Image (tube, grey):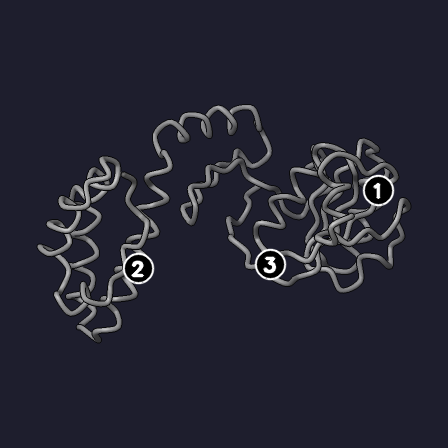
Protein backbone atom coordinates (compact mmCIF):
# COMPACT_ATOMS: atom_id res chain seq x y z
CA UNK A 1 0.00 0.00 0.00
CA UNK A 2 1.19 3.50 -0.83
CA UNK A 3 0.57 6.05 1.96
CA UNK A 4 0.29 9.78 1.39
CA UNK A 5 2.72 11.59 3.74
CA UNK A 6 1.12 14.54 5.47
CA UNK A 7 1.59 16.80 8.50
CA UNK A 8 -1.72 17.80 10.11
CA UNK A 9 -2.60 20.85 12.19
CA UNK A 10 -4.73 19.42 15.01
CA UNK A 11 -4.66 22.40 17.36
CA UNK A 12 -8.01 22.55 19.14
CA UNK A 13 -9.30 19.45 17.33
CA UNK A 14 -11.07 16.66 19.17
CA UNK A 15 -8.96 13.50 19.24
CA UNK A 16 -10.21 10.32 20.91
CA UNK A 17 -7.68 7.88 22.34
CA UNK A 18 -8.91 4.47 23.49
CA UNK A 19 -6.53 2.77 25.92
CA UNK A 20 -4.83 3.50 29.20
CA UNK A 21 -1.43 1.84 29.03
CA UNK A 22 2.06 2.93 28.02
CA UNK A 23 1.29 3.07 24.31
CA UNK A 24 -1.77 5.25 24.87
CA UNK A 25 0.31 7.46 27.16
CA UNK A 26 2.93 8.04 24.48
CA UNK A 27 0.26 8.88 21.93
CA UNK A 28 -1.48 11.28 24.30
CA UNK A 29 1.72 13.11 25.21
CA UNK A 30 2.60 13.66 21.56
CA UNK A 31 -0.92 14.82 20.76
CA UNK A 32 -0.82 17.29 23.65
CA UNK A 33 2.41 18.76 22.30
CA UNK A 34 0.54 19.41 19.06
CA UNK A 35 -2.34 21.18 20.81
CA UNK A 36 -5.05 18.55 20.40
CA UNK A 37 -8.16 18.45 22.60
CA UNK A 38 -7.90 14.87 23.85
CA UNK A 39 -10.71 12.59 25.03
CA UNK A 40 -9.55 9.39 26.72
CA UNK A 41 -11.38 6.08 27.16
CA UNK A 42 -9.92 3.24 29.18
CA UNK A 43 -10.72 0.79 31.92
CA UNK A 44 -7.46 1.30 33.76
CA UNK A 45 -5.74 4.68 33.56
CA UNK A 46 -2.34 4.81 35.20
CA UNK A 47 0.98 6.60 35.25
CA UNK A 48 1.16 10.04 33.71
CA UNK A 49 -2.21 9.59 32.03
CA UNK A 50 -3.92 9.60 35.38
CA UNK A 51 -2.11 12.81 36.33
CA UNK A 52 -3.06 14.44 33.03
CA UNK A 53 -6.70 13.57 33.60
CA UNK A 54 -6.61 14.81 37.19
CA UNK A 55 -5.01 18.08 36.06
CA UNK A 56 -7.69 18.60 33.44
CA UNK A 57 -5.31 18.40 30.49
CA UNK A 58 -7.08 15.30 29.17
CA UNK A 59 -10.83 14.67 29.16
CA UNK A 60 -11.80 11.27 30.55
CA UNK A 61 -14.95 9.78 29.01
CA UNK A 62 -15.03 6.62 31.11
CA UNK A 63 -13.94 2.97 31.07
CA UNK A 64 -16.16 1.69 28.25
CA UNK A 65 -16.11 2.60 24.59
CA UNK A 66 -19.29 3.77 22.88
CA UNK A 67 -19.46 4.56 19.19
CA UNK A 68 -21.08 7.94 19.84
CA UNK A 69 -17.97 9.11 21.69
CA UNK A 70 -16.33 9.53 18.29
CA UNK A 71 -18.85 12.08 17.01
CA UNK A 72 -17.12 15.32 16.09
CA UNK A 73 -13.63 13.86 16.22
CA UNK A 74 -10.87 14.64 13.77
CA UNK A 75 -8.66 11.69 14.69
CA UNK A 76 -9.09 8.45 16.59
CA UNK A 77 -6.40 6.21 18.05
CA UNK A 78 -7.14 2.71 19.32
CA UNK A 79 -4.28 1.71 21.61
CA UNK A 80 -5.59 -1.13 23.74
CA UNK A 81 -4.22 -4.67 24.09
CA UNK A 82 -7.60 -6.00 22.87
CA UNK A 83 -7.42 -6.40 19.09
CA UNK A 84 -11.18 -6.90 18.79
CA UNK A 85 -11.89 -3.70 20.67
CA UNK A 86 -9.39 -1.86 18.51
CA UNK A 87 -11.16 -3.20 15.42
CA UNK A 88 -14.53 -2.10 16.78
CA UNK A 89 -13.16 1.39 17.39
CA UNK A 90 -11.70 1.42 13.89
CA UNK A 91 -14.98 0.37 12.28
CA UNK A 92 -16.89 3.05 14.18
CA UNK A 93 -14.40 5.69 13.06
CA UNK A 94 -14.48 4.54 9.43
CA UNK A 95 -18.28 4.66 9.45
CA UNK A 96 -17.98 8.35 10.39
CA UNK A 97 -15.20 9.07 7.85
CA UNK A 98 -12.76 9.82 10.69
CA UNK A 99 -9.10 8.95 10.28
CA UNK A 100 -8.17 6.15 12.67
CA UNK A 101 -5.00 4.42 13.81
CA UNK A 102 -5.21 1.02 15.48
CA UNK A 103 -1.82 0.33 17.03
CA UNK A 104 -0.06 -2.70 15.52
CA UNK A 105 -3.11 -3.47 13.36
CA UNK A 106 -2.36 -1.87 9.97
CA UNK A 107 -5.37 -3.55 8.38
CA UNK A 108 -7.59 -1.53 10.74
CA UNK A 109 -5.85 1.80 10.10
CA UNK A 110 -6.64 4.61 7.70
CA UNK A 111 -3.40 6.31 8.72
CA UNK A 112 -0.16 5.17 10.31
CA UNK A 113 2.15 7.12 12.59
CA UNK A 114 5.76 7.34 11.41
CA UNK A 115 8.84 7.05 13.58
CA UNK A 116 10.07 10.62 14.10
CA UNK A 117 13.09 12.66 15.02
CA UNK A 118 12.01 15.99 16.47
CA UNK A 119 14.32 18.94 17.05
CA UNK A 120 11.91 21.72 17.96
CA UNK A 121 10.26 22.68 14.66
CA UNK A 122 12.45 20.34 12.63
CA UNK A 123 10.58 17.05 12.33
CA UNK A 124 11.93 14.14 10.33
CA UNK A 125 9.44 11.34 9.68
CA UNK A 126 10.45 7.79 8.77
CA UNK A 127 8.04 5.17 7.52
CA UNK A 128 8.30 1.73 5.94
CA UNK A 129 4.56 1.85 5.16
CA UNK A 130 3.96 -0.48 8.08
CA UNK A 131 6.21 -3.24 6.71
CA UNK A 132 9.07 -2.96 9.20
CA UNK A 133 8.67 -0.66 12.22
CA UNK A 134 11.95 -2.10 13.53
CA UNK A 135 13.83 -0.76 10.50
CA UNK A 136 12.13 2.63 10.87
CA UNK A 137 13.34 2.77 14.48
CA UNK A 138 16.89 1.87 13.43
CA UNK A 139 16.91 4.65 10.84
CA UNK A 140 15.48 7.03 13.43
CA UNK A 141 18.36 6.31 15.81
CA UNK A 142 20.85 6.98 13.02
CA UNK A 143 19.18 10.30 12.22
CA UNK A 144 19.13 11.25 15.89
CA UNK A 145 22.92 11.01 15.91
CA UNK A 146 23.22 13.14 12.77
CA UNK A 147 20.62 15.79 13.54
CA UNK A 148 21.33 16.93 17.10
CA UNK A 149 19.56 19.70 19.04
CA UNK A 150 21.56 22.40 17.23
CA UNK A 151 19.38 21.78 14.17
CA UNK A 152 16.37 22.85 16.19
CA UNK A 153 18.14 26.12 17.00
CA UNK A 154 19.07 26.51 13.34
CA UNK A 155 15.47 26.13 12.21
CA UNK A 156 14.34 28.65 14.82
CA UNK A 157 16.93 31.17 13.66
CA UNK A 158 16.18 30.65 9.98
CA UNK A 159 12.51 31.17 10.71
CA UNK A 160 13.21 34.50 12.38
CA UNK A 161 15.48 35.58 9.54
CA UNK A 162 12.89 34.56 6.96
CA UNK A 163 10.24 36.69 8.63
CA UNK A 164 12.56 39.71 8.82
CA UNK A 165 13.67 39.36 5.19
CA UNK A 166 10.16 38.85 3.80
CA UNK A 167 8.98 41.96 5.62
CA UNK A 168 11.27 44.02 3.35
CA UNK A 169 9.22 43.17 0.27
CA UNK A 170 12.24 42.22 -1.84
CA UNK A 171 11.91 40.36 -5.17
CA UNK A 172 11.34 36.63 -4.77
CA UNK A 173 14.58 35.80 -6.61
CA UNK A 174 16.58 37.90 -4.17
CA UNK A 175 14.86 36.26 -1.20
CA UNK A 176 15.65 32.82 -2.58
CA UNK A 177 19.31 33.76 -3.00
CA UNK A 178 19.51 34.98 0.60
CA UNK A 179 17.87 31.88 2.05
CA UNK A 180 19.97 29.53 -0.09
CA UNK A 181 23.18 31.33 0.91
CA UNK A 182 22.27 31.01 4.57
CA UNK A 183 21.69 27.26 4.56
CA UNK A 184 24.89 26.72 2.58
CA UNK A 185 26.98 28.85 4.95
CA UNK A 186 28.61 27.73 8.21
CA UNK A 187 25.72 29.10 10.23
CA UNK A 188 25.15 25.69 11.83
CA UNK A 189 28.80 25.56 12.87
CA UNK A 190 28.51 28.95 14.55
CA UNK A 191 25.42 27.79 16.44
CA UNK A 192 27.06 24.51 17.47
CA UNK A 193 30.09 26.39 18.77
CA UNK A 194 27.92 28.97 20.54
CA UNK A 195 29.99 31.58 18.69
CA UNK A 196 27.85 34.73 18.52
CA UNK A 197 30.56 36.79 16.82
CA UNK A 198 30.99 34.24 14.04
CA UNK A 199 27.25 34.00 13.60
CA UNK A 200 26.86 37.77 13.32
CA UNK A 201 29.65 37.94 10.76
CA UNK A 202 27.86 35.36 8.60
CA UNK A 203 24.54 37.15 8.92
CA UNK A 204 26.03 40.56 8.07
CA UNK A 205 27.54 39.09 4.93
CA UNK A 206 24.29 37.55 3.69
CA UNK A 207 21.27 39.24 5.27
CA UNK A 208 20.26 42.81 4.31
CA UNK A 209 21.03 45.36 7.02
CA UNK A 210 17.38 46.43 7.29
CA UNK A 211 16.39 42.84 8.06
CA UNK A 212 19.18 42.45 10.61
CA UNK A 213 17.83 45.44 12.51
CA UNK A 214 14.55 43.57 12.97
CA UNK A 215 16.23 40.33 14.01
CA UNK A 216 16.17 39.21 17.63
CA UNK A 217 18.68 36.46 18.35
CA UNK A 218 17.30 36.14 21.86
CA UNK A 219 18.70 33.11 23.66
CA UNK A 220 19.40 31.03 20.58
CA UNK A 221 23.10 30.68 21.26
CA UNK A 222 24.56 28.71 24.10
CA UNK A 223 27.41 30.03 26.18
Q: Quadrant of the C terminus?
A: top left
Residue 136 location (% of width, % of height)? 51, 29
- Residue drawn at 76 percent across, 64 percent down: 72
Which of the two discs, 2 and 1, labels the residue nearer the N terminus? 1
Q: Circle 2 sits on which residue?
A: 160
Q: Is residue 170 above or below residue 177?
A: below
Nearer to us in this view, 27 or 86: 27
Q: Secondary structure at mark 3?
A: loop
Q: Quadrant of residue 68?
A: bottom right
Specify the quadrant of the image occupied by residue 114.
top right
How far separated are the C-alphas under marks 3 and 2? Answer: 24 Å
Q: Position of residue 15 (x, y in %)?
A: 70, 55
Q: Which residue is mark 1?
A: 42
Disc number lying in front (2 or 1): 2
Neighbours of disc 3 within 10 Å: few (<14), some (14-19), many (20+): some
Q: Height in image: 199 above or below 179? A: above
Residue 210: x %, y % from top left? 15, 70
Q: Residue at x 51, y 53 (%)?
A: 7
User: For numbered disc 2, what is the local secondary structure?
Assistant: helix
Mark with earlier residue (1, 3): 3
Extreme bottom residue here?
A: 169
Quick check: marks 3 and 2 in contact, CB under 8 Å? no
| Residue matched to label 3 | 10
Q: Are marks 1 and 3 in contact (CB under 8 Å)?
A: no
Amino acid sequence: MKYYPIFVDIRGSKVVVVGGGEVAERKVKTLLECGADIYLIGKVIGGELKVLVENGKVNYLGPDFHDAYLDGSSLVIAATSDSELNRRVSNAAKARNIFVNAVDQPEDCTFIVPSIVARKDLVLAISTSGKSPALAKKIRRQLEDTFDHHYGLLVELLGRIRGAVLSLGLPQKQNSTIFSSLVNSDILGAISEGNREKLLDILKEIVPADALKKLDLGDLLEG
